[in-house]
Amino acid sequence: MIIDRKAMLEDRLAAKDLDHQFRHRIEHGMGCSPFISEAITKVVHEVYLPVLDSQVNLKSGQMLLQCLSERNGSTTRIAEAEQVTVILTIDAGQVDQDVRKKEGVEGLRRFRICRICSEAYSQGGLLTVEDIAYRIFNVGERTIVRDLSLIRKEGENPPLRSTIKDIGRTVSHKAVLIKNWLKGDELSDLNRKYNHSFSAIESYINTFKRVVFLSHEGYTVERIAYMQKISDTLVTTYIDLWEQYKEKAMPHRIREIIDIIGEKAVSKKKKRRES
């Protein structure tokens, strides 16, 4: 019998790694089969390794937070929702100190709210008012709701679960963004105001254009919502926005929409109103 010393060496080395030790303990301590221990090891990798890796990359003033994933639907129960771990900057050092000198403690909190919401969103997560109030700033929900109201009055709309997924009574951030686009804001302006990526902004605009087109083609609100995978409320909001701004939006924006739906569709609408 020929002994394969190279294979034996590889087996010995493999037996010394952490995964092998973990599987060995599960198999012998809990009576699991190798198949089950391998599956458990894979789940541990998926859940805990990203957190351990993130710890190495944390900077001073940052924290790790488990929050809801952007991929969850608006009707998904929180207990059953997918979650992600995100890195949030609670204290940005001199930047935050400058904001506090200029706008005070409350102004700094609003500044930080915008930052952490954008950071979570850019990493595939969505914060809730509860997250911000109880898990991050340790203040009441009313305080955060009041802060968000003031932030929106200033023209910004932080990406929260309630706005991204159109939950509750909050006016969708997408509708506000589209309104400013119709008024002439360019992608760079919208990126600066709402802290959304250029690809996300382009996606919102393209969805708006498709909703307007499908509406002029005679599709119902429910059908459009199903086709575009958005809420009925958002479809209605988009249609109302176009009706409101199709004659007072910037000319080049009107032209963009008319190029899609056609001049005839617009003229038919005008004739119906005149008659």
Image (tube, rainbow, N blue to C red):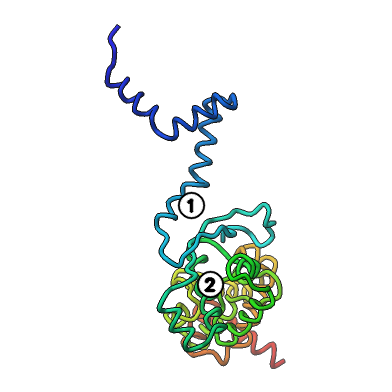
Task: Tell me the quarter of the image containing the N terminus.
Answer: top left
Q: Can you identify the residue that label 2 sits on?
A: 204
Residue 83 rendering spot, x and y as whole percentages? 58, 55
Badge 1: few (under 14), some or many (20 or more) residues near its Cα, within 10 Å? Answer: some
In the rendered image, the vertical position of residue 15 relative to residue 157, given as above or below: above
Residue 74 rendering spot, x and y as whole percentages? 66, 62
Residue 35 rendering spot, x and y as whole percentages? 53, 28
Q: What residue do we see at 34% from left, 28% from top?
A: 13
Q: What residue do we see at 45% from left, 50% from top?
A: 52
Q: What residue do we see at 65% from left, 85% from top?
A: 269
Q: What residue do we see at 53% from left, 86% from top?
A: 104
Name the one closer to the observer, 156 or 106: 106
Q: Can you identify the residue that label 1 sits on?
A: 51
Name the one closer to the observer, 2 or 198: 2
Q: Is residue 214 left or right of residue 24?
A: right
Kindly identify the amino acid type of the residue bearing the numbered disc 1: Val
Task: Name, please, the residue furthest toward the top.
Answer: 1
Circle 2: element type: helix
Of the residues under marks 1 and 2, which one precedes in the sequence? 1
Kindly identify the amino acid type of the residue bearing the numbered disc 2: Tyr
